[in-house]
Image (cartoon, grey):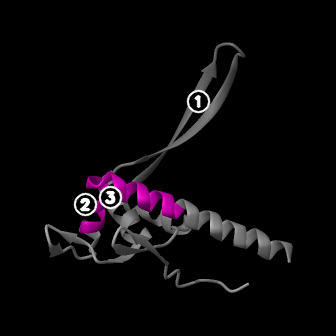
């Protein structure tokens, strides 16, 4: 099986533009969480019906803004043909975050495309394991 260590991304067509997306691997996701001040919270909760204590582990990201910027900058590799009021809208980390936050249709398109891309990658992994 050929590894995609570059993870260069896949191009999708959106309206009259193109967007290059890639799935974020868990190692990168953890890196972004650490950079944004991820805190692991351990709690013990007593269940009154069963009289059993359960340990709950959750995460809290201190700097959500930085986490979002790192994540969207990674998964949106690039775009072509984006304009705002007739002026080219360059593909920068700030503009990626702005586009995802302010254009719900674009945000849905990116989320759905990433989900499809992830499903395709998972299917390829399963097929490779079967061979």
Image point (49%, 72%), residue name: 22
Q: Is residue 113 magenta?
A: yes
As drawn, the residue found furthest toward the top would be 49
Residue 61: x %, y % from top left: 40, 50
Marks 3 and 2: in contact by CB < 8 Å?
yes
Image point (29%, 55%), residue name: 103
Q: Is residue 98 magenta?
A: yes
Residue 70: x %, y % from top left: 36, 65
Which quadrant of the view contains residue 18?
bottom left
Q: Is residue 10 visible?
A: yes
Which quadrant of the view contains residue 130?
bottom right
Q: Residue 100 bears which disc, if any?
A: 3
Q: Is residue 91 left or right of residue 67?
A: left
Graded by Cα atoms within 10 Å as few (under 14), some (14 to 19) or many (20 or more), the crowding at tag 1 reads few
Label 3 or label 1, whichever comes before in sequence order: 1
Q: Quadrant of the N terminus?
A: bottom right
Marks 2 and 1: in contact by CB < 8 Å?
no
Image: magenta residue range: 95-114
Q: Is residue 60 left or right of residue 95?
A: right
Who is closer to the viewer here, 10 or 35? 10
Label 1 or label 2, whichever comes before in sequence order: 1
| Residue beneath disc 1 | 44
Who is closer to the viewer here, 128 or 80? 80
| Residue beneath disc 2 | 98
Who is closer to the viewer here, 48 or 16? 16
């Amino acid at each position: 099986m050929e590894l995609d260590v570059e993870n260069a991304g896949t191009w999708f067509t959106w309206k009259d533009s193109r967007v290059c997306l890639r799935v974020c691997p868990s190692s990168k996701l953890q890196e972004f969480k650490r950079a944004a001040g991820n805190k692991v919270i351990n709690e013990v909760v007593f269940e009154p019906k069963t009289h059993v204590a359960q340990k709950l582990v959750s995460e809290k990201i201190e700097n959500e803004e930085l986490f979002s910027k790192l994540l969207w900058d990674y998964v949106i590799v690039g775009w072509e043909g984006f304009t705002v009021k007739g002026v080219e809208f360059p593909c920068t980390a700030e503009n990626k975050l702005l586009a995802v936050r302010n254009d719900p249709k674009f945000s849905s398109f990116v989320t759905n495309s990433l989900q499809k891309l992830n499903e395709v990658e998972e299917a390829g992994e399963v097929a490779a394991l079967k061979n």
